[in-house]
Amino acid sequence: MSSLVAFLALPAVALASLTVADPSDVISPSDWAADNAIVPDYNTPFISVQPSDILAAYYFENGTTTVGHNSFSVDANDTSVILVADGADLSLKYVDIVKYGYSSNLLQASFYGFNAAINVANASTAQISNSNITVHNGAANVYSYGTDTVVHVDNSWLYSSGPVSHGLYASGNGTIIGRNIQHYSGGHRSSSFSGDSPKGDVFVYDSVAHSSGIGSATYYALGTIYAENVLSQSDNGPVVFMDGDQNATLINCDATAGLLGGVAIFSSSVRMSGATLTLKNSKITALGSTMPGLWFGNTIIDVTLDSSELITSSGVLVVANYSQITQDFDYYASYADNSALQPAEVFVTVKSSNLTGDLVAYNSSYISWSLQDYSAWTGKAYAGFGDASFDVALDRHSTWTLTDTTTVQNLTDTDSTLSNIYSNGHTLYYNASAVLSQWLNGSTVALSGGGSAVPL
């Protein structure tokens, strides 16, 4: 992956670069361009009960089995290479697995793991280590389904082409834990590390991930995503997709997004609350000229940015909107696409971070922005369309440098003189009637740089 580059500072003389490889450097995506061009069709009848006829070339049911230094493959549609089921425990060490064959029903593939290379289901467990798993035509590499199903994948290499070709994929309350993973997916809507309905919990450590298909994120959160020390790039998707009241935590991660936003978090039907996003010692880079660092629609969410960076070409840090993502995960839905939505409410706590960019809210959406623990923000807040509201809070050790006139509802600052707000000659309007602004007693306060905080 020539575009994933880690920079190493050499003492006082030069700056060298180390290119990080991923599986697409070994198997060229151009060899599987036809697979990767397939646009998924999810307009099939929903299946509410797990089918009993999951096909596989190799079955491990009940008991404990260890297999090492072996190869497994299959070339058949709707057929896994390995199925682990009914409370079985399988240990795979130093194995090669190759999967060919299409998925005729992408809902079955998504929710129940049909056609996955390895499908672990129904309170079974698996340990996969030092292995290569390659899938073509549209299949997940490793799938975990069902309560008490836990899969560990360590020191392994995962390559996939075609739709629904997620790397680590959990659903139905299943869990996957990956360590030292290298992953590449080339298909549409094929994220590296994914959960699906009703939820899947995915934990990944010390890994490299690259997804290039449209709508393919590094992480798809429908359940819990926890990532630590992961270097990733999503060429045509965000770093994180999240639908509903899910939870995503990235620690010591460096992630790049190429479509929609650094993250794209929404509720696909009724607006839900309870979602959380945490970045700690992490960086998200949003490449597109109109992409925000963080995008939220039709959701209520708590966000923590702790010692982290948001790098954007657009100059926009956060967007809150009355919107969601389309079925193809390739653009933001408009009012014409779905009018049964609600404004986003986004509560962001910034700790020990230095951020530059704007806050933008649309269509009665709301952003709360709290700077703590020696944070610094350079930017402004404004409505992108219609009405919008913003609250800004600072502790005495944090600073805000205005880049334009800004209006907020609640303005709070533990520095009672507002000396940590630098105006650059701009006016900061606040709502004198708002509960958390009343400490200012409706007064006009001169700000450093020639501007003022003025009551409305």
Image (spheres, grey):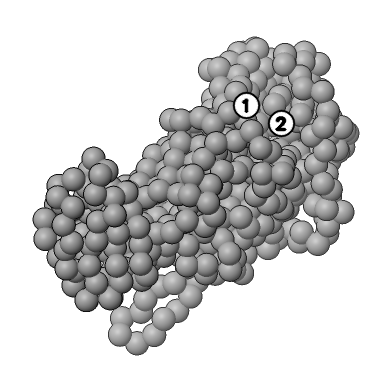
Residue 222 pos. (x, y %)? 56, 32
**Vertically, is 324 above or below 351?**
above
Q: Is residue 339 left or right of residue 305?
A: right
Mark 2 belongs to which amino acid? Answer: Ser
How packed mark 1 is, by other alpha carbons closer than 10 Å (few <14, some 14-19, many 20 or more), is some
Tally of numbered tags: 2
Residue 310 pos. (x, y %)? 43, 60
On the rendered image, what quadrant is the N terminus found in?
Answer: bottom right
Residue 246 pos. (x, y %)? 49, 33
Residue at the image point whose x is 58% and y is 28% from the top: 270
On the rendered image, what quadrant is the C terminus found in?
Answer: bottom left
Viewer-proximal residue, 422 or 278? 422
Q: Is residue 100 left or right of residue 379?
A: right
**Vertically, is 152 above or below 161?**
above
* Residue under numbered circle 1: 197
Residue at the image point whose x is 28% and y is 75% from the top: 424
* Residue under numbered circle 2: 110
Are discs 2 and 1 less than 8 Å apart at CB?
yes
How packed mark 2 is, by other alpha carbons closer than 10 Å (few <14, some 14-19, many 20 or more), is many
Taking the image as drawn, is residue 151 in sight?
Answer: no
Residue at the image point whose x is 69% and y is 26% from the top: 111
Q: CA distance from mark 2 to mark 1?
A: 9 Å
Viewer-proximal residue, 278 or 343? 343
Kindly give the residue lying farthest to the bottom in the view shown: 13
Residue at the image point whose x is 29% and y is 63% from the top: 428
Viewer-proximal residue, 290 or 113? 290
Which is nearer the N-term, disc 2 or disc 1? 2
Viewer-proximal residue, 95 or 13? 13
Residue 320 pos. (x, y %)? 49, 48
Mark 1 belongs to which amino acid? Answer: Ser
